[in-house]
Amino acid sequence: MAPIEVKKICCIGAGYVGGPTCAVIPHIQVTIVDLNQARIDAWNSDELPIYEPGLEDVVKATRGKNLFFSTDVDKGIADADLIFVSVNTPTKKSGIGAGFAADLKFLQLATRRIAEVATSSKIVVEKSTVPCRTADAMRTILEANSKPGCRFDILSNPEFLAEGTAIADLFAPDRVLIGSLQTEEGLDACRALSNVYSNWVPRDQILTVGLWSSELSKLAANAMLAQRISSVNALSAICEATGANIDEVAYAVGKDTRMGSKFLKASVGFGGSCFQKDILNLVYLSESLHLPEVAKYWRSVVELNEYQKSRFARKVVDTLFNTITGKKIAVLGWAFKKDTGDTRESPAITITNHFLSEKARISIYDPQVTESQMWLDLTDYGDIPAEPIKPHITINKTVEEACAGAEAIVVCTEWDEFKTLDWEKIYANCPRPAFVFDGRLILDRKKLTDIGFQVITIGSGDRI
Ligand SMILES: NC(=O)c1ccc[n+]([C@@H]2O[C@H](COP(=O)([O-])OP(=O)(O)OC[C@H]3O[C@@H](n4cnc5c(N)ncnc54)[C@H](O)[C@@H]3O)[C@@H](O)[C@H]2O)c1
Ligand SMILES: O=c1ccn([C@@H]2O[C@H](COP(=O)(O)OP(=O)(O)O[C@H]3O[C@H](CO)[C@@H](O)[C@H](O)[C@H]3O)[C@@H](O)[C@H]2O)c(=O)[nH]1
């Protein structure tokens, strides 16, 4: 049989994954489709819907040439030989598995649409992060609805990009993972997708495995990355109680080549749309498989993360003489990490909610997050009334405004610009004692202490 050549790609879902992932594919025609008109309009404009370093240049270079954005989902599907399904798979909010299981309704709707619209054979690629064996359900939906002469081969091709470094990650990935059935047709489909990636990824970095291993590897990778952060955050609490310094401990531990130095930065806790969701997904999977001890182990990674966020918020209250009621607190950083405008599961939201429950006055600054997004987060997308919160919240355009008159400055996101602020000027405008809480270990503690600040850092005792 002649190898399948992919000439046209469709990607369903123009989000944080679909957009950047497809924008880096050279030569081959790629159409990214989405039901969200505003999102597609933004992708077709000068104001892209997401902030990601390097993304604008890549999109400008390819848009209208081999890269297209459209709301015409059916045409995108009909024209393509290969379809990436890159829709959101959030944690279920109600029903069986609520709070743990992945909500696969968007994935299933997209799959059903492919079956209904396709009049020729397609390779369907799971790009979304999904529970193990989701490809089975997709195959059942596709085969039950397909037209004569149409065959569907399903591949798993999880995405490992991290926000803030997505473009660099996509151009030079540590690995590309492709899972397929080990049948002749499955392996053919796998070769076709490998050939797409081999346009820019070295062959030996394209890993081909079985479908279920591929699906599980994505959950495993995120769980193990998050587990490192929870481990280092657990140690940070011990450091604070003993006078050890978590940066020094992490450095010493990470020097062991069996361990490696990455993902050992203590913090206010991990955020982002993936880690918590994917671990809870793994917890649910473990429970469904009657493996309660395994479920408990992974659940503890999320529980420790919750503990770290509330521990940090409590430390602010304790340090400000046990009350922050009516006091101005500056929250620096709202995004879940630097170099992104994404706020999903951002620790800054949880920490601010703690401050709100203590009736503090909170001033927020973030260089990339819009005011409207902050209000969506503060009201849990309309579930919490805004009126009672409004008198307690100010959103500022500059750090200086946010910090003026603040009794505590709380760094929640590790934006580089916070390292080089005019801290002397900020200090001059703060009441005494002036407290800085460094939740990301990015500030020069000695310099700030010399200026006069009382600096409280995650993972280190009072001594410097
Ligand atoms: N965000 C990340 O950094 C990241 C990294 C790796 C993997 N993932 C995974 O990739 C998937 C997508 O994540 P994301 O962050 O891009 O989500 P997102 O919410 O930013 O984008 C998903 C898009 O899919 C669209 N969509 C939903 N159903 C649709 C349908 N039936 N037809 C057409 N469009 C539809 C939505 O309108 C939305 O624009 C998730 O499973 C996530 O876990 C995310
Ligand atoms: O040492 C560290 C590293 C990260 N973080 C925090 O952990 C969260 C997640 O960071 P990161 O993993 O860099 O960003 P994500 O975009 O969430 O990427 C993760 O989630 C994606 C979605 O599944 C995967 O594709 C990526 O491989 C995986 O790194 C952020 O709040 C970070 O501030 C720490 O606190 N300490």
Image: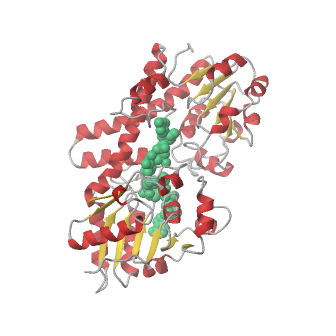
Q: How is the image coloured?
A: secondary structure
- For image coordinates 31% across by 75% down, the residue present is 152
- For image coordinates 53% across by 63% down, the residue present is 19
Q: In the image, 236: left or right of 352?
A: left
Which quarter of the figure is the N terminus placed in? bottom left
Which quarter of the figure is the C terminus placed in? top right
In depth, the one of 384 and 79 nearer the eye is 79
Residue 448 image position (x, y, % from top left): 67, 21
- For image coordinates 43% across by 78% down, the residue present is 7
Q: Visible in this render: residue 78?
A: yes
In depth, the one of 268 and 113 nearer the eye is 268
Where is 243 relative to 234, above or below? above
Residue that lies at the very extreme toward the bottom in this rendered image? 148
Residue 103 image position (x, y, % from top left): 39, 57
Where is 60 relative to 370, above or below? below
In depth, the one of 170 and 19 nearer the eye is 170
Q: Visible in this render: residue 43?
A: no
Residue 219 image position (x, y, % from top left): 34, 49
Q: In the image, 138: left or right of 50?
A: left
**Location of residue 349 by image quarter:** top right
In depth, the one of 30 and 320 nearer the eye is 30
Where is 204 relative to 149, above or below? above
Where is 138 relative to 258, above or below? below
Q: How many marks?
A: 0
Residue 44 image position (x, y, % from top left): 63, 69
Q: In the image, 272: left or right of 139?
A: right
**Location of residue 315 by image quarter:** top right
